[in-house]
Amino acid sequence: PYTGPSAAEILQKRKEFLSPAMFYFYNDPIHVVDGKMQYLFDENGRRYLDGFGGIATVNCGHCHPDVVQAITNQIQKIQHSTILYLNHAITDFAEALASKFPGDLKVLFFTNSGTEANELAMMLARLYTGCHDIISLRNGYHGNAASTMGVTGQSCWKFNVVQTGVHHALNPDPYRGPFGSDGEKYAKDVQDLIDFGTTGHVAGFISEAIQGVGGIVELATGYLPAVYRIIRNAGGVCIADEVQAGFARTGSHFWSFEGQGVVPDIVTMAKGIGNGIPLGAVVTTPEIAKVLTRRNYYNTYGGNPVCTAAGLAVLKVLEKEKLQQNAHVVGSYLKDRLLALKDKHELIGDVRGKGFLLGVELVTDRKEKTPAKAETLHVMNQMKEMGVLVGKGGYHGNVFRITPPLCFTKDDADFLADVMDYTMSKM
Ligand code: PMP
């Protein structure tokens, strides 16, 4: 049994010693002591079904034994070699990861987070094209450093950083956008931004294919192919942010951009790449990668043996346990169950997403699509009381984000849907 500090003590110390900006889920936050696969356990040994997977980070399951073993083996050999010497952990992982990409995407840079990966990707785009302007989507999230905060398209995540050369395009949001599911119509806005807001040449375009923080918004069909054409005509490169949606999560594909049938010039990764270990990556073509040889580029921890050993173990687990297939089969089943709940509960305005990247948007009025903020919080708290954790997102905080570890079973899916149904029925 757990004998450490209590939840109340931890909360008190967080308030005293940690950033006042740190926030937590639930009125009465959970004190997580252990994690095993799709479950989390609190200080009293109470089990929770994890429908959020550490924000889509824990792909293989909490403390997956193969990943833990790979980390343990590596940390006992050499933890930090610096990339100035040779070690095979980084090359083994780079080779395995590169094999997951289409086209000429095969040169990897390793970082420690998704923010860093996106910062690097945009710097590559700017160096390669000699241009500065970058187009991103309203409602997207890309990180919390200067450039990434700039391209992030939600005011709640922006501080007053100097935001130069950023243009936020109309979000191709099938539920709330003005053109419904017609991706090509939204793409026209990107051409307008280039024509009326730049020299006609841009460094590039960055977006998720399914927005995570933004509330599981699947970009309208046909949007990315049209925008990639427009961007390339303007001399820019196309960056796909796979930090949240990558690594088999969408089920139908390993990368979410594949769902739109495009091949980006640069792809960024983090979260699911290391099952919770601090690791991020950028992949690009040899031609674009070359621009970084103009100066010294160095990252102390990026690609260290422990994190890359974890990354390789994750790829092996995804394959061995057929987790992409599981995300597709169980994720589709869960989505059907959630769609059935939409027929039953007026509160649910929309159910969307793919695989284990699902969103349930709550509205108080289906016609007006009025965000049901308070109701979302209520349902989330009640579900937690019944042992099920889901995430929350969207600009108005009224979308459940259901992004469990990819080992989630059909029984887990039923339990989650039943608990949501029960909670909404009691309202
Ligand atoms: N891109 C996306 C799509 C994300 O969801 C996040 C994190 N929520 C980031 C980038 C930033 O990653 P990190 O928090 O590791 O810096």
Image: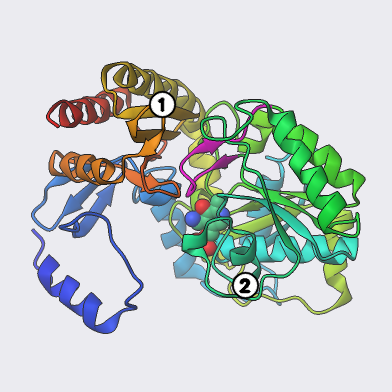
Q: Assess disc 1: are there few (<14), some (14-19) or many (≥20) residues with their C-alpha within 10 Å of its C-alpha.
A: few
Q: Determine the main secondary structure of the stretch shown in magenta.
A: loop
Amino acid type, mark 1: Lys
Quadrant for residue 28, please give it.
bottom left
- Looking at the image, the residue that sits furthest to the front is 368
Q: Is residue 44 above or below residue 342?
A: below
Q: Position of residue 142 (x, y in %)?
A: 58, 57
Q: Position of residue 402 (x, y in %)?
A: 38, 38
Q: Is residue 44 above or below residue 378?
A: below
Residue 53 included in the magenta stretch of the image = no
Q: Assess disc 2: are there few (<14), some (14-19) or many (≥20) residues with their C-alpha within 10 Å of its C-alpha.
A: some
Q: Is residue 28 left or right of residue 70?
A: left
Q: Secondary structure at mark 1?
A: loop
Q: Which residue is mark 2?
A: 146
Label placed on residue 367: 1
Q: Which residue does the image show at 30% across and 79% down from the upper left? A: 18
Magenta highlight range: 210-221
